[in-house]
Image (cartoon, rainbow, N blue to C red):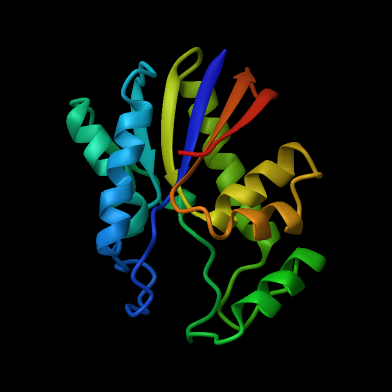
Amino acid sequence: MTTVYFVRHAKPDLSVYDDLTRPLTKSGVQASRLVTKFLRDKEIDHVFSSPFKRAIDTVKHFANDSQLSIEVIDDFRERKISDHWIEDFNSFAKRQWEDFDYKLINGESLHEVQERNVVALKILLRDYPDQNLVIGTHGTSLSTIMNYFDSSFDYDFFNRIKGYMPFIIRLTFSGEKLVDVEELLI
């Protein structure tokens, strides 16, 4: 069995509009220490992350503490919404969950996000069988991955976890088959 701990990033500083470089808030940095405490005894073999600063920084303390490097995988990045900041994120997100192909100009649909995230995950499952992995991720990316394996993880799941930062969910796989899911609030 391969165990994957998806770690949704801690609280980001939304005053920084650039998605790639948006840092954690001070409380987000402190919360990342809870991630370390939670994962410390899980015998993690590898740490991966989205290229976004907030995802990397959420798992960085754990990786350093465990003397593991973080391999950044671009396909685990969060969805691109548009070239511009949108004010009504909730309405936009709901519309995307209602139509997985809906997207704004220069943005990504949830179908596109799901496809690239699942392909990246399946590569890890193939390359690291029977190991324990950590992946620093985002709410939308994680939700679309979950939805791929089980359609009951839908908009309601996405909406429910929006406020959990950080959030950890453990997925257990036999090959590429998902056999167990456990939400782990820290």
Pick the front one: 163 or 69: 163
Q: Position of residue 71 (x, y in %)?
A: 31, 38
Which residue is rendered at x = 52% and y = 21% of the image? 3
Residue 60 is left or right of residue 140, and the answer is left
Q: Quadrant of the N terminus?
A: top right
Left or right: residue 30 compared with residue 138: left
Residue 20 image offset from top left, x and y in percent? 35, 66
The x, y position of residue 28, in whole percent, is 32, 56
151 up-or-down from 43: above or below:
below
Quarter-of-image position of residue 53: bottom left
Residue 52's spot in the image, x, y percent?
35, 58
Residue 85 or 117: which is nearer the viewer?
85
| Residue drawn where x is 53% and y is 18% of the image | 2
- Name the residue: 70% across, 58% down: 111
Residue 99 visible: no
* For residue 54, side relative to residue 26 (left or right): right
Above or below residue 56? Residue 108 is below
Instruction: Return the residue nearer the eye: 37 or 181.
Output: 37
- How many numbered circles does the render carry? 0
For the point 53% across and 25% down, the residue is: 125
Q: Is residue 55 visible?
A: yes
Q: Is 133 left, or right, of 80 in this rendering?
A: left
